[in-house]
Image (spheres, rainbow, N blue to C red):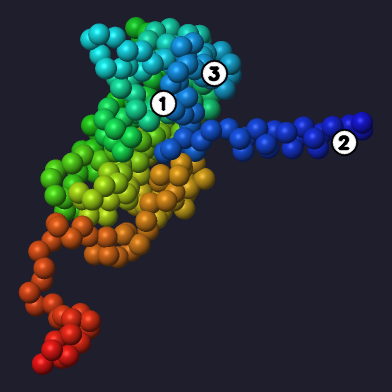
Amino acid sequence: MTLRLRSILAAAAATLLVAAAPAGFYARQAQPIWNRIAGAPAGLRLEAPDRQTHVLARYTETEKTDGEVTLRVRGKLGSGTVSLGPGVGSELLWAPNSRAFAVTTSDGGANGLYRAIVVALGRGGLKVTDLSPLIRSAFGHPVKCGWPEYPNVAIVQWRDGSQKVIVAAEIIAHSNCDSFGTFKAYEVDWRARRITRTFDQIEAKRLFGRSMGIELRNAPNECIRSPRRCWVATNHEPDPSAKPSESKATRRRTRS
């Protein structure tokens, strides 16, 4: 076998491995946890890009809890255990320089409510920073809802090594709020807990679409361009001044 042929075969194998790798729901490059640890007593081992740190994700049930997902961290990044609580839909995204990792996880069901944390080495050991309060405060309540509801908060990608992250705030995808399933994105200096840039959905897809998981890629853009098309009917009373539709007008003429 020639050297050139070996190179071609190696490149093809690498491409197949990447294509076969499980993708995250919110972040395409994230490693899914939740759907891979069920029935895995030994847990799921997730290695940092530099292979100097690993995380062992495990799901356990006790008499005190219905179920808990824990992340045991060992290596250059530090040592310790991080609890994700129920950990539903959890996924982990390593920083390219291996100096931190981010996790998106739900404390409720598979639809939400999701929150986003960053784990890195602090002065006294592992430091966990929850970005959800910052993002939810910035996102607010931009549309009408049947009842007040926070958005899902999810990590999309890292920027500047491990200095910043792109985070999405998504209106939970069920028929409570208008334009459900749409989102905004934020560039966040997570150590300073400061938002440095804000992106609407269409701009975020253009800039970061390749890094997004299927949930964000499929967010309906028509709801951004024409919000009324994505209203939830029960959130809006009928307009008495509106003209009847042609079908209703036709029925009236037929009956007279």
Please tell me which of labels 3 and 2 falls first in the chain: 2
Residue 155 position (above or below residue 69): below
The kind of residue on which mark 1 rests is Trp
1 or 3: tag closer to the N-terminus = 1
Q: Nearer the observer, disc 1 or disc 3?
A: 1
Task: Report the side of 153 relative to 94 (left or right).
Answer: left
Residue type (three-letter) at the residue carrying disc 3: Glu
Cα–Cα gap, marks 3 and 2: 31 Å
Q: Earlier in the sequence, mark 2 or mark 1?
A: 2
Task: Name the quadrant of the N terminus.
Answer: top right
Query: Which quadrant, please, contains the C terminus?
Result: bottom left
Query: Residue 189: x percent and y percent?
Result: 36, 32
Tell me if residue 24 can be seen.
yes
Report whether residue 82 is seen. Answer: no
Residue density around tag 1, few if under 14, some if 14–19, many if 20 or more, within 10 Å = many
Q: Residues within 10 Å of mark 3 (few under 14, many from 20)?
A: some
Residue 52 in the image: state x and y as whole percent. Answer: 56, 13
User: Mark 1 sits on what residue?
Assistant: 34
Give the spatial CA distance, label 2 vs label 1.
Answer: 41 Å
Question: Does the residue at mark 1 contact the one at mark 3 (Cβ under 8 Å)?
Answer: no
**Residue corresponding to mark 3:** 47
